[in-house]
Image (spheres, grey):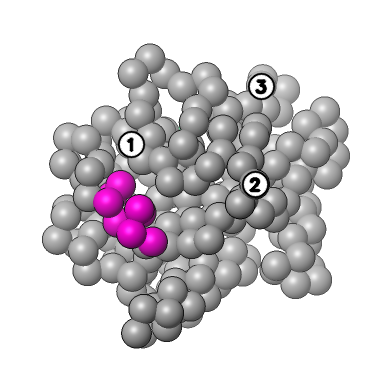
Amino acid sequence: TATIGVLAVQGDVREHLQALERGGARATTVRRRSELEAVDGLVVPGGESTTMDKLVRVFELQQPLRERIAAGLPVYGSCAGMIMLADRLADGAPGQQTLGGMDILVRRNAFGRQLDSFEEDLHIRELGGEPVRAVFIRAPWVEEAGPTVEVLARVEHGPATGRIVAARQRNLLVTSFHPEVTGDHRVHRLFADIVRESLRERS
Ligand code: GLN
C-alpha cells in the first residue's frame, strides 16, 4: 500500500491524517528528511504559509522537498499548501519563499474582507456527480495557470465567480479550500489514486 505523509511543521495536520486514512490510504507525519524519503506522496496542509515557509527552512526540508517534487513526488496542497506549491506568488509577505513545482501564480488572501471565510458547493467532474462542500478560510486563488495545468474547479457564485480554486498538474494537486474539515473524503481519495498510479508507473 501507498504511504502518504502530511507535512507536520504547522497547520491542520491531524485532520488530514484522518481524512487520508478514511479515504483508504496509510498516513504518517513528515517533519524530517528521513521521514520525507519514506513516503510515496505528501499533503501540505492549510495553515499560515509564511510560518510554514520559515519552518520548512529551519527544519532543513526546503531543498529535499524541492528535489522530491522535481523528481515527481505526488503532492496535494490545500490552502496554505497551495501557496507552497506555487511557482509564483502575488501578495506574498516580504521574503516569503515557496517550494514551487506548479506552473501557477497564486494570490494569497485573495477573497478580501467580505469573503474572508465562506462556503460554497463546487462541481468537480473528477469527483463524480455530487457537488463538494468547499470551505474557504482566508483562502488563496490561482490567478494564472500555465498550459499544462488542468483546472478542476472555479468559484460558481458571487464576486469571485470564475476564479480557479482547484487544479492539477501531473502529480501535483491543489485546492484553495479545506476538504479535511467536511467529512467528505473524495479529494483525499483522488489524491490517493494519484499516489497509487505514480507508484505503479515506477515499478
Ligand atoms: N491565509 C493563509 C496564508 O496565507 C492561508 C489560510 C489557510 O491555509 N487556511 O498562508
Residue 6, position as x, y percentages in the image: 35, 58
Q: How far apart are the alpha carbons under marks 3 and 1?
A: 22 Å
Q: Which region shows up in magenta?
A: 65-72
Distance between the Cα atoms at labels 2 and 1?
28 Å
Dot 1: element: helix
Q: Is residue 157 part of the magenta span, yes or no?
A: no
Q: Is residue 117 visible?
A: no
173 vs 17: above or below: above
Q: Which residue is mark 3?
A: 112
Q: Secondary structure at mark 3?
A: loop
Per the picture, the main secondary structure of the magenta-coloured stretch is: helix
Residue type at mark 1? Met
- At horizontal 57% and vertical 70% (from top left) the residue drawn is 190
Amino acid type at image mark 2: Pro
Kindly tell me whether mark 1's CB lies below 8 Å from ligand 1: yes
Q: Which residue is mark 1?
A: 52
Identify the image quadrant of the N terminus.
bottom left
116 displayed left or right of 40:
right
User: Considering only order in the chain, which callout, 3 or 2, is on the residue closer to the N terminus?
Assistant: 3
Residue furthest toward the front?
147
Q: Is residue 1 above or below residue 109?
A: below
Where is residue 140, by image quadrant?
top right
State yes or no: Cβ of the residue under disc 2 lies below 8 Å from any atom of ligand 1: no
Q: Could you tell me residue 169's position as x and y percent? A: 55, 55
